[in-house]
Image (spheres, helix red, strand yellow):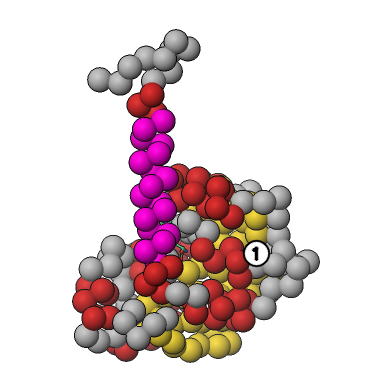
Amino acid sequence: MPRLDSNGSTRYGAIVSAGGLLRAGLFHYARLLGNGMRAVREVEAALGATPDESVLDFACGCGWFSRAVPGHYLGIDLDRDYIRFAQWRWGSPRRRFEAMALEALPEDTRFDKSLMASVLHHLSDAEAAAVLGRLARMVRRRLVVLDLDPEASNGVQAFLLAHDRGRHVRPVACQRALLERHFRVVEQRGFPNTPHTVVHVLFACEPR
Ligand SMILES: C[S@@+](CC[C@H](N)C(=O)[O-])C[C@H]1O[C@@H](n2cnc3c(N)ncnc32)[C@H](O)[C@@H]1O
């Protein structure tokens, strides 16, 4: 049983929170080892954000892609441990991270640009439609979407893909069709992060 401190709180909370940070750190550094920096560079180039543009990173996880943004950045995610890690590792007055749902942002919130990295395959078609519809109302200039390309992955890559936690891995054409219901896709390209990791596809989208 956790022991009570003199102020009535428990040390259990601190242990749980250290465990959460450890889980987030493992996720973050495993991705760094597995994927390297290529995806950040690709997203940075496709986003083309300038220091005076604001960027929303939807489902930012541990904040890996905040480095692709030179100006005001808001990363949101439902996982509180990931957000606490991101605040600790990357947080600054220009780089904010919040544990919140997209729907919780005020309806009149606007961002110049947005990104969504490795998220689409975690969302069902209905969830993706809701998220993309909201982003289409919120983003003025550009949305960059990065996800997995199951058809271009084989060998070790296909094994990793089969064990991904996302339950909605889709062929690239299906991903593009989901995006095109809400945005104009102005660029699409694939790239491997490293020879052994899953091939990624990147879409640059603009509001209609
Ligand atoms: C594979 S991780 C990618 C994290 C980050 N974008 C990156 O590339 O490092 C998927 C993330 O999506 C988040 N997520 C899934 N569904 C979500 C939702 N409906 N709203 C916000 N975040 C969500 C998870 O908590 C997780 O952090």
The reply, left or right, for residue 204 in relation to residue 92 is: left
Residue 79 versus residue 145 in the image, above or below: above
Q: Which contiguous range is marked in magenta?
A: 14-31
Q: Position of residue 109 (x, y in %)?
A: 67, 55
Is residue 8 within the magenta segment?
no
Q: Secondary structure at mark 1?
A: strand
User: Residue 49 placed where, x, y %?
Assistant: 69, 73
Q: Tell me which amino acid carries mark 1.
A: Val
Which residue lies at the image location 46% right of the left edge and 57% below the top edge? 61
> Please, which residue is most extreme toward the top here?
6
| Quadrant (top left, top right, bottom left, bottom right) of the N terminus | top left
Task: Answer with the quarter of the image where residue 171 lies.
Answer: bottom left
Identified at 27% across, 74% down, the residue is: 161
- Residue 185 vertical position relative to residue 95 in the rendered view, above or below: below
Report the magenta stretch's main SS: helix
Is label 1 within 8 A of ligand 1 (CB to nearest ligand atom)? no
Closer to the camera, 184 or 160?
A: 160
Query: Considering only vertical position in the picture, is 133 above or below 141?
Result: above
Residue 142 position in % (x across, y down): 63, 75
Q: Is residue 15 magenta?
A: yes
> What crowding class fits label 1: few (fewer than 14 Cα within 10 Å), some (14-19), or many (20 or more)?
many
Instruction: State the residue position of label 1.
Output: 55
Judging depth in this view, the residue of 29 and 203 nearest the camera is: 29
- Classify the position of the C terminus by image quarter: bottom right
Residue depicted at 38% across the width and 47% down the height: 22
